[in-house]
Amino acid sequence: MEIISHAYIFLGSDEDTTQRAIDLAKKVNCENMDLAPCGFCKTCRKIQNKTHPDVAEIYPDGVSVKIEQIRKLILSLAEKPTEGPKKIYILHEAHTMTPQAQNALLKTLEDPIAESIVILLSNNLKKLIPTVISRCQIQDFSEFDVKPILSADIRRKIVDILYQNTQKSEFTGFSEYVKELSDVDENAEEILEFILSMYRDILLAKTNSSAAFINKDLKPEILKYVSISTVDSILRALDLVYKQLKAVKSRGNKNLIWYNLLIGLKEV
C-alpha cells in the first residue's frame, strides 16, 4: 500500500502538475477506495470541477506568494475537513514564495497535521529553501529524455572522478582529476548534462522521492552520495553545474570549466 506523504513538491509545468495534484486529491478522498481515484463518484467530480470545499488552490498575489497567504493557509490547516478525510492545499508557482512565507510554511511542514496534505507546484527547485525541500517528497514530472546519452562506462568514470574529488579533504590529485575530465572523449556539454542528471537523482534519493532515476543503472554509485550530502549541498552543486554548462555554451575554456567545477564541488 502506498504511503501518502504530508507534503509534496511536484516539478514540471503548472498545467501538468496541477492535474497531478488534483488526481492526488481525488485519490485520498475518493468514495470508492478500491478504485481510487475512480473519477466518477461525487467527490471525484467535485474535485475535478474545483468545487470541493476541502481542496484549496493558492496562487501568487502579484509576483509572489506572500506570507499573509501562508498564514491564512496555516489557520485553515487547524480546521477539520468538511466532507472528506483529507484537506488538500495546492500552491501554484511555489518557488515565488517570499523567504518569510517559506519560513512560515516550514513550521507547518515540520509539525504536520495528519488530515492535511500540502502540494507545492514548481518548475524551479533552486528558489525553494533547502529546509522546505527536505520536508517534502519530490515528484519530478519535468519533460526530459530519460535515456542517458553517454555510455555506462563513461558515466561511471565521471561519477568516480567526482566522488574521489569530493571525498579528499586535501587538494592532492586535484590537477589529475581535472586532466581526467579533460581527457574524457566526449562533448563537454553532454558531460555536464549528465552531471546535472546525476545530482538530480541524488536529490531524489536524499528526499526519498518515488520519482524514477534518470541513471537507473548507476543507482549504487548515486546512493554513495546520499550519506555524504545534504539537500543544501546538492542544490548548490546543481547551481554550480548549471553555471559551468552556461560557460560551455558560451565557448568557455574547457580546462578552466573543469577546474571551476571540481574546485566548486569540493566547497559545496
Image: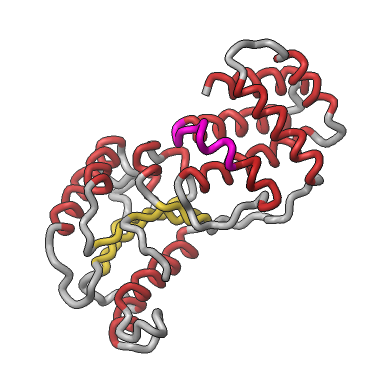
Q: Main secondary structure of the magenta part?
A: helix
On the picture, is 160 further left or further right than 59?
right
Highlighted range, magenta: 223-232
Q: Residue at x 13, y 54 (%)?
A: 75
As drawn, 255 above or below 16: above
Marker count (numbered): 0
Quarter of the picture holding the N terminus: bottom left
On the picture, is 33 further left or further right than 189?
left
Q: Answer with the quarter of the image where residue 21 lies.
A: bottom left
Question: As rendered, which of 110 and 132 lies closer to the eye?
Answer: 110
Residue 106 screen position, x and y as percent: 27, 42
Q: Residue at x 74, y 36 (%)?
A: 191
Q: Is residue 225 magenta?
A: yes
Question: As rendered, which of 265 and 129 lies closer to the eye?
Answer: 265
As drawn, 18 above or below 34: above
Q: Answer with the quarter of the image where residue 48 lies.
A: bottom left
Residue 3 screen position, x and y as percent: 38, 64
The image's colour scheme reads secondary structure
Q: Residue at x 27, y 68 (%)?
A: 55
- Single out the residue that lies furthest toward the right: 185
Residue 188 screen position, x and y as percent: 78, 33
As drawn, 45 above or below 100: below
